[in-house]
Amino acid sequence: MQIPGQPRVEIVVPVKNEENDLGPNVRRLREFLDTAFPFPAEVCIADNGSTDATYEIATILSAELPGVRVVRLEQSGRGRALKQVWSGSGAEVLAYMDVDLSTNLNALLPLVAPLLAGHSDVAIGTRLAKGSRVVRRPKREFISRSYNLLLRATLSAHFSDAQCGFKAIRADVARELLPLVQDTSWFFDTELLVLAEKAGLRIHEVPVDWIDDLDSRVAIAKTVGEDLRGIARLMRSRVDLEPVRQQYGRPRVLDPRTAFAARLLRFCAIGVLSTATYALLYLVLRQGLPAQVANLLALLITAIGNTALNRRITFGVTGVEGRWRHQLRGLVTFGIGWSLTAASLWLLHTAVTTPHQAVEVAVLTIANLAATVVRFSLFQTWVFDDDAVLNAAPPARGSRGFDSRSSLVAPVASLPALLSPDREAP
């Protein structure tokens, strides 16, 4: 409930050593809020660990400008600053933006309006969606797009831009979600969005006009390393999102054919990697072993890796439960694949007494691709079926935990049924 006199929107500006940009940009932001923004709004400067005159300037601004306050944190970290300020705010909607104001302020109202109306739970500015107008260096563009593609591949993320410094969240949602976010630095944004999406929250995206800050001090190599570690942690973690899902979740329905296509693409990508690894291993092992033995060992090693990758990435099964059962069933599919490749190798040696190794590899690669089709069918219908990976995404109300399988899987009866042009849409 909104208390009279409290702002409906609080905009946090996290800063560290920004003595040059802080004054003019906060004044510009405050002027915009006073003249062009229809809701009462407060600006909070969150100084996290500055060693220059940033805090002193922030203190002067808070005394000079109504609707500006300052919070001082001794430790650095954008996520830490946002978490502390947002957790103690009395506003209905909590937002943040970078101090450089790279994002055009005209996007602020479209960002927060759906949250104030209750239509959405989280809102993000996106530089990567249709309608965005972005001016930035090719290197930064490449890194940004690659990072968001990586999030799609590893965490099944569906939002388009994880790290644009222009986001907002409803305060009631934040109170439930913030305690679950562990990161206190640059990965904070990504983790918050991933958890929100897995909990079934609605994420509203606003295409923005954005101009790159040429004075950006983000340490790209360090940030990339932190992001990769954060992704790995989220892939392993099981966060209990059920309370958030029960209170705020909105079921997302995927067309089964779309889910199947996404799963098939992942399986094919892993299959290509496995086939290349298999061929390389075979060539190495063939230097000192007979063809059949080299084939058996190369296929066994790649089959174990293939099952593990498909378990986690294609079918979204996490945790240790059932891991050995899945590997055992995977080895059965390996046996079928091995029989196909062994038979093709036997036929080759029957037809040609001493075939060239390149011919052997070509024949075995074709046979292995055929075995891959069989493996996908068995993975789909048997290997992981006991884990209910064919349920619709995301988890239904009453399910427990954060499981990355929820964003991809859907009921699949059979490949022919899905590909049939006469099949009715659900």
Image (tube, grey):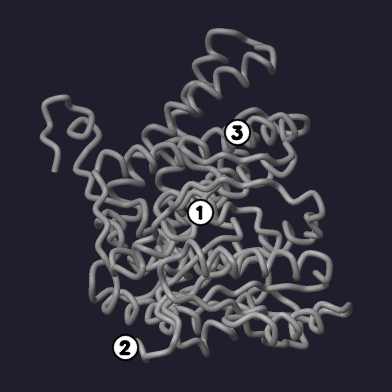
Does 277 appear above or below 354?
Answer: below
Q: What amino acid does circle 3 point to?
A: Asn
As helix, strand or loop, the secondary structure at mark 3 comes to: helix
Q: Label 1 vs label 3: CA separation? A: 62 Å
How many marks the image carries: the answer is 3
Q: Residues within 10 Å of mark 3 (few under 14, many from 20)?
A: many
Pinpoint residue 419: horizontal percent, then vertical percent: 23, 29
In the rendered view, tell whether residue 66 sits above or below residue 4. above
The answer to whether marks 2 and 3 mark residues whose Cβ atoms lie closer than 8 Å is no
Looking at the rendering, which quadrant does residue 378 occupy?
top left
Q: Quadrant of the C terminus?
A: top left
Judging depth in this view, the residue of 338 and 104 nearest the camera is 104
Query: Which of disc 3 and disc 1 is earlier in sequence?
Result: 1
Give the residue displayed 69% in from the left and 32% down from the top.
Answer: 280
Could you say where residue 39 lies in the image, as x and y percent from the top left? 41, 71
- The disc, 2 or 1, on the residue closer to the chain's N-terminal end is 2
Q: Residue 106 has which mark?
A: 1
- Mark 1, secondary structure of its residue: helix
Amino acid type at mark 2: Met
Q: Residue at x 23, y 45 (%)?
A: 412
Q: Which mark is residue 295?
A: 3
Residue in front for this viewpoint, 256 or 181? 181
Q: Nearer the viewer, residue 48 or 242?
A: 48
Q: Which mark is residue 1?
A: 2
Residue 172 makes an appearance in the image:
yes
Q: Position of residue 287 (x, y in %)?
A: 77, 30
**Horizontal relation, residue 170 to residue 106: left or right:** left
